[in-house]
Every structure is written in structure tokens, then in C-alpha cells.
Amino acid sequence: MRQRTVVMYVEIGCFVSCLCGWVLNCSTLATEYWVISESASVVLSAGDYYSNLWMDCVADTTGVSDCKYYPSMMDLPVFLHVCRALAVVSVIFGFWGAVLALIGMKCTKIGGSELANARVTFTAALTYMASGFCGMIVYSWWGDKTRSEFVDPYFLELKFELGAALFIGWGGSCLLICGSAVMCYFSGRESFPKRFNKQPRKPPTYMTARTRRTYMLPGSSRPTTVIIPPSHQSYSESRGTRASGGRRGTQASQSSRSVRPSLLPIDSAV
């Protein structure tokens, strides 16, 4: 009972961690500051340029900003399409992970048996982990592209720096991965008890037909059973009976040869 209570509180903590990470990842989709660039070479034209997955924005010194969505979806690079897809998949996985976790957790008592609840929780942990990895791939790929363009001396276009949305996404993805890993461990122990609670097995034995002795086999070999047919067994018994009878007859003949008849003297015979 005490172990069940500990596991229940661990599941609650992991669920809260994963839920916070999922909320942080969702908030980055609506944030414009994925990358940001400050242009202050001329005082009158100073402004901030920033962009995200969906639009490019510019803000001047007076605080007025103007955003423009990307004009054509077919004209966008493959990098942007893949990042969009992974970000949306991360949000979807996080949503279904929350639904499965609420069904399978011990504190909700919605599912059926303990084994069924543990397996549902294990599935929720895997879904959360997939969500965290998808988000981590998006933010890391975007940050690496921004860094490589910034340090490239031959890149003559406007150079950007890392925005706040990337750091928020990295934090949310770390919460998702860490929480789902702990949840996966504890729920996996209950879902598959035979794999975690392995008992040492004794080495198998086998019996030979002639000696009927027991020999020890190595642990890697499989137990084998030797079946002695009844005809062979009766033949061996009859053979043993004949051998014992022959020994008795030999001993009797040797004893009869050792006893010699006594000869009477000649005088008494006369």
C-alpha cells in the first residue's frame, strides 16, 4: 500500500511536469520572437526585425510594429515546412499524452484494473516523450541555423539572433522529456513485471539411459528429457538377470571342484 502511494505521487509530479512543458511549447507557436535582429546603423531608421514560423515583423523606435505573413506556402523552403510540421505534431502528442495520463493514473480511478491502468500510463509516457523530442528537434534545428548564419562571414543578408521563444521551447521540451522518462520507468515496472523481476533459474539436468546418473548442464542450454522405451528397459533387465545367474552358476561349479572325494585305504578294502 505504501509503495502504491509513492508511485501515485510520482505520477502526479511527472504529469504536472509534462503538462507545464506542453503549455510552454504551445505558447511558442504564438510568439513572434523566434529570432530577432536590431538594426541601429542609422538613428532615423533604427528598428527591430523578428520572425517566427508564420510571419515576419518589424518595429520602429516609436513602438509601432507591422507583421506580414509569408506570401506563398509553396514558395517556402523545406526547412520551414518541416519545422512547422514537427511543432504541430509536438502539440498533438502532448494533448493525447495528457488524455491518456488522466485515464491511467492511480489518483483518477477512471481505468479498469491495476495492470490496465499501468499500461495506459506507460503509453501516455511514451506519447509525452515523443512530444518532447519533436519540440527539441524544432528548436535545436532553428537555433543551429540561426547561429550558423550569424557566424558565417559570407552571409550578406540580415543576421538574426536567438529569440525568447527558442529558450522557452528548450525549457518546455526538457520538462516533457524528463517527466515522461520518470513516468515511463515507474509505469513500465508495473506493466511488465516479469521483465523487471527476474528470478535466477537453476541449471537444468538430464538423465542417461545406461548409468541413470544426473549431470549438470550449463545455464544457457535448455532442459532435455530422455525417454527410455519399454522394450529397451526390459532388454536391459533381462540382460542383468542373465548376468547374475551366470555368476551364481560359476561360483557353484568352483565350489564343487574344490571339494574332492576321500579315498579309502587299500587294507580296509581288502
Image (spheres, rainbow, N blue to C red):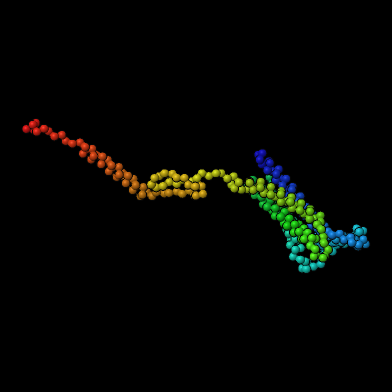
Residue furthest toward the front?
Answer: 153
Residue depicted at 92% across the width and 58% down the height: 62
Residue 142 is at least partly visible in this image: no
* Residue 12 percent coordinates (x, y): 72, 45
Q: Is residue 178 above or below residue 74?
A: above
Q: Quadrant of the N terminus?
A: top right
Instruction: Write down the quadrant of residue 154 in the picture.
Output: bottom right
Residue 268 is at least partly visible in this image: yes
User: How many circles with numbers are drawn on the protein?
Assistant: 0
Instruction: Write down the quadrant of residue 157 in the picture.
Output: bottom right
Q: Quadrant of the C terminus?
A: top left
- In this view of the protein, which residue sits in the foreground, 209 or 49? 49
Task: Tell me if 222 is positioned left or right of 119 in this view.
Answer: left
* Residue 83 percent coordinates (x, y): 75, 61
Residue depicted at 79% across the width and 57% down the height: 29
- In this view of the protein, which residue sits in the foreground, 48 or 105? 48
* Residue 177 percent coordinates (x, y): 71, 51
Residue depicted at 53% across the width and 44% down the height: 201
Task: Tell me if 128 is positioned left or right of 211 in this view.
Answer: right
Residue furthest toward the top?
Answer: 268
- In this view of the protein, which residue sits in the foreground, 148 or 82? 148
Residue depicted at 70% across the width and 53% down the height: 129
* Residue 71 percent coordinates (x, y): 81, 67
